[in-house]
Amino acid sequence: MSHSHNAIPPELLFYASAPHPCSYLEGREAVTLFADPEAKMSTALYSALSELGFRRSGEYVYAPRCPACSACLPARIPVSQFHPNRSQRRSWKKNSDLSATVLPAEFRQEHFALYQAYVNSRHPDGSMATPDPEQYNRFFTSSWCDTRFVEFSDHTGVVAVLVMDLLANGLSAVYTFFDPEAAQRGVGVHAVLWLVEEARRRGLSYVYLGYLIHESPKMAYKANYRPLEVFRSGVWQLLEQRQD
């Protein structure tokens, strides 16, 4: 176990949600474990919880704890060992005209308009449809986390925004949204590759990608980044190559 687990106070409480329909796999029931929302959260504490498979959504730090299912695998890229595959190298080259600007996590109308366009093209019927600025801020930022917005721009302006959290030992990809017109660029792949390079530049060990779910097309793409570590049975282990 990493020494950073000393950052987790023994008195920190965790609460399980009532069972609810799974957002990713139809017909499954999910249970979510939350770190006490009343507890004093910090980057150090969140970093330690990230090493145990927890994620952040707004102010809340959570992990799936479903009694009958273990499909959600916390996933991270070990930066020093990562090598992009051919398709990822192509994507990097295709997006070589993009410049990246790291900004404080503050509301910007241009970002919000891009987010609205993205959500309406991707998830028009989902829970995130017709977002308002308050929801947007609540979803991406928190009062305690060291978050940055990264703008990717070409000669026409901003084409994508990556929301990332700075952790003690890595960078965490919170969300990436982009201009629907730029979908063919593969800017989501570019954002992950940029995170790996940025983590290297900062001397950090990992890029946390959230949950890999093999059965969910939206979440299965994370297995394309190799080597990839997943948190399973209480330890981080290399994801084996799948035969199918």
Image (cartoon, helix red, strand yellow):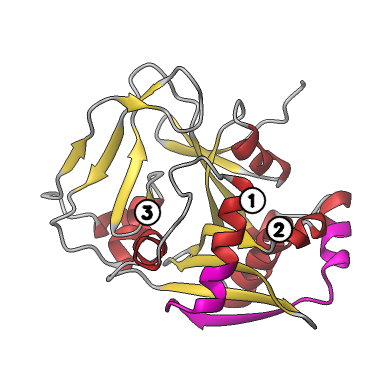
Estimate the x, y position of residue 67 in percent, counting from the top left: 33, 20
Front of the two marks 1 and 3: 1
Residue 236 in the figure: left or right of residue 180: left
Residue 50 vs residue 139, the one in the foreground:
139
Q: Which segment did they paint magenta?
A: 89-113
Estimate the x, y position of residue 128 in percent, counting from the top left: 46, 49
Q: Residues under labels 2 and 1: Cα distance?
A: 7 Å
Numbered label attached to residue 57: 3
Question: SS at mark 3?
Answer: strand
Residue 179 visible in the shown view? yes
Q: Residues under labels 1 and 3: Cα distance?
A: 22 Å
Q: Tell me the crowding category of disc 2: few under 14, some 14 to 19, or many 20 or more residues within 10 angstroms, Cα based.
A: some
Estimate the x, y position of residue 58 in percent, counting from the top left: 34, 59
Q: Residues under labels 2 and 3: Cα distance?
A: 24 Å
* Circle 2 residue: 180
Sequence-wise first label, 2 or 1: 1
Front of the two marks 2 and 3: 2
Sequence-wise first label, 2 or 3: 3
**Residue depicted at x 69% and y 45%:** 227
Is 91 contained in the magenta span? yes
Residue 167 vs residue 93, the one in the foreground:
93
Q: Amino acid at mark 1?
A: Ser
Q: Are marks 1 and 3 in contact (CB under 8 Å)?
A: no
Estimate the x, y position of residue 182 in percent, counting from the top left: 77, 62
Question: SS at mark 2?
Answer: helix
* Circle 1 residue: 121
Q: Quadrant of residue 224?
A: top right
**Residue depicted at x 61% and y 29%:** 214
Q: Are marks 2 and 3 in contact (CB under 8 Å)?
A: no
